[in-house]
Image (tube, rainbow, N blue to C red):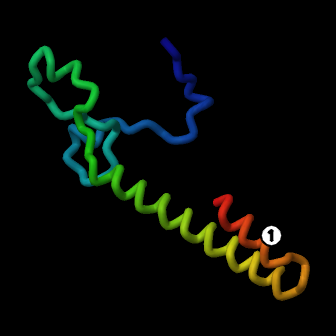
Amino acid sequence: MVLIVSKCVLQKPRKIGAKYSGKDIAADEFVQPKLTLTYDGKRDRWNGYNPEEHQAVVEEFAKVEMAKRQLKAERLQSELLEGKLSETSMKVQLQLE
């Protein structure tokens, strides 16, 4: 158990918590919803999983990968125009992706 010394606290604690005073200010703490779950429901590791959120992550990753490939192709094209690369070495580098 950790004791909070009043000298260390930066904000003055409230006399009456927001939960009991009825004022529309920031809550003291997050109140967990009361869930009545079965034995299996409590131990379900996929409880609350939303596949749409994961799909958004996958789409963002695909956008980043496409941007990386486009930048690499532009860089190789500019090096080819400057004469730093030959066409065969450019084709090899593009196939390695």
Q: Residue at x 49, y 58 (%)?
A: 61
Relative to 24, say whether 9 is above or below. Answer: above
In this view, the residue in front, 50 or 22, is 50
Q: Residue at x 61, y 29 (%)?
A: 7
Q: In which image quadrant can residue 5 be found? A: top right
Q: Return the x and y of residue 52 as percentages of the image width and height.
A: 28, 54
In this view, the residue in front, 4 or 15, is 4
Q: Return the x and y of residue 97 as percentages of the image width and height.
A: 64, 60
- The residue indicated by pointer 1 is 89
Q: Return the x and y of residue 20 as percentages of the image width and height.
A: 21, 38
In this view, the residue in front, 87 or 5, is 87
Q: Residue at x 56, y 28 (%)?
A: 6
In this view, the residue in front, 45 or 78, is 78
Tell me which amino acid carries mark 1. Ser
Q: Secondary structure at mark 1?
A: helix
Q: In which image quadrant can residue 96 be found? A: bottom right
State left or right for residue 57 relative to residue 31: right
Relative to 74, say whether 95 is above or below. Answer: above
Relative to 4, say whether 9 is above or below. Answer: below
State left or right for residue 90 relative to residue 46: right
Taking the view exactly as shown, the residue that stands out farthest to the front is 88
Relative to 61, say whether 87 is above or below. Answer: below
Q: Residue at x 70, y 80 (%)?
A: 74
